Image: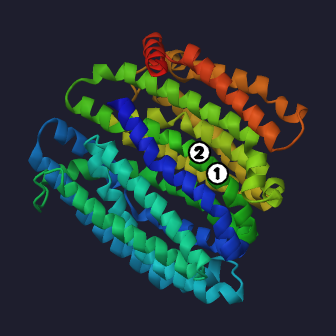
Amino acid sequence: MLLRNSLWNLSGSAIPMVVALATVPLLIGALGVEGFGIVTLVGSVIGYFGVLDINLSAGSIKYLAEHHAANDRERFAETFWFGTLFYGCLGLLGASILYFSSDFLIARFFEVSPAMRADTILAFQLGAVGFALTQAQNYLLVVPQALQRYDRSAQSEAFFGVLVNLASVAAALAGTGIVGVILARVSVAAANVLYLAWLIGTFELSLSPRWPRRDVRAALTSFSAYAYLSKIASTLHQHADKLIVGAIAGPVALTFYTVPVTLAGRILGLTYRLSSVIYPRASALAGAGRINELRPVYFGVLRYVTYINLAALGIIVLAGDEFLRRWVGEEFVQQGYLVLVLMTLALLIDSLTNVPSLVNDALGHPRVTGRFALANGLLGVGMVYLGTKFGGITGAAAGHLFSSLTLGLTFLLFVHGRTVPIAFNDTLRQGFGRSLAVGALIICVLAPLKWLVPEGITSTVVIVSTAIVTLGVAGLFFIVSVDERAAVLSRARRLRS
């Protein structure tokens, strides 16, 4: 079930990611560099307003999974309605603040050309409505995830994720400008909320409205209060860098920064979807008193996700410049390839902490994850500010890398043997250590080919194909366990016959 859920969860993000990457050149062409930068700013500011969210969704997944495993229907319903009321109020509050502060934000913090100012304000105001819808959408998704029905949540994410990108491009190509693009995205978000409400109804969960009892409220808010620190850090990490670059360097530089950062984030973000399914599983095991079953699951997820992340890094290093050249043009290679490499390294280091963080939270220790995540976010903001001030967009990416390296390693050393009941040496040996060693060795051997062969799409395809085959074979014989390898080879033989 865990593998199936991982693949479904991956597909829910992978399909929209491919469409989103494919539509970036169309959006830049239709909106212009400044227009695309403004759309990015709108999304970043709306995302930044997510700091109002105390991360009740993380606690909801944990307790919904536990109550469902214990067949406690009343507490399940009470947890659901408490979260629904919270996110409804949060959406209205955030939307109101964003709507009425749009003019001030544009005038005070961002350099927008006079010709684009009126449309930018209207786009921010429409985005305020989108903020409210996004809060509802994100919370409703936790129900199928807590039930470990990632097939249904992934289908929703994939369909509406593709739709929002296609609708954005259609609006841009129709000449509606940044206002039309934001309006299209808000409309798709509204349709998604309606669909998710219908989907939850099909699970027959007896979710008649009710006010949660005190112990339900206390457990959920106590957990979420600490998880909120992680939410703040995530918001800082995902959006503050764009706000800093936009404020210091302007929308044009922000576009050259956003494109490679988006590419790196989308690719490595996919593997988080593979690992995140361990959270409701660990919560359910804890709720059912079967925590001893966690250890092999933990090592397996760590081993595979780390190797896949490192393989993705190798592909980006080997083919990132050629991809940027074919995707958005030569100027983005000159401005953004080094940013792409640095951000990929930073995200790779961050990815090493994902599974430990999820297990740490599932076992009831969100304050540890939250404190480290907040420290990483604050350090990251400071380093990105200094980096942008003195090194432009390359300095911003280097700032990310420094903070990820410093806090990521500290976190891993701290939690293992404490809040995660597995020794760090065991994790290194049976989890990500072998994956890092094998993957890094292969990438180091293949990397010189990039500078030894002539530039061009044909050479890049050959190098990338060689890397994929080499990494795949090495993964099969050195990363996959003996039993799993036998199962894979047996299935391959059946397919051939």
The answer to whether residue 252 is left or right of residue 44 is: right
Q: Which residue is mark 1?
A: 263
Q: How is the image coloured?
A: rainbow
**Number of residues whose C-alpha sits closer than 10 Å to that of mark 2, classed few (under 14), some (14–19) or many (20 or more):** many
Q: Residues within 10 Å of mark 1 (few under 14, many from 20)?
A: many
Residue 157 quadrant: bottom left
- Hey, what amino acid is under mark 2? Ile
User: Would residue 395 be visible to someone looking at this image?
Assistant: no
State left or right for residue 308 relative to residue 401.
left
Compared with 10, 27 (above or below) is below
Report the residue at 59% width, 76% height from top.
Answer: 172
State the residue at coordinates (74%, 70%): 252
Q: Which residue is mark 2?
A: 267
Left or right for 302, reference 40: left
Total labels drawn: 2
Separation of residues labelled 2 and 1 (CA atoms)? 6 Å
What x and y, as percent, mark residue 55? 37, 54
In front: 320, or 139?
320
Q: In what element is the residue under mark 2?
A: helix
Find out whether the residues at labels 2 and 1 contact each other: C-beta distance under 8 Å: yes
Q: Secondary structure at mark 1?
A: helix
Q: Quadrant of residue 294?
A: top left
**Residue appearing at x 65%, y 42% in the figure:** 346
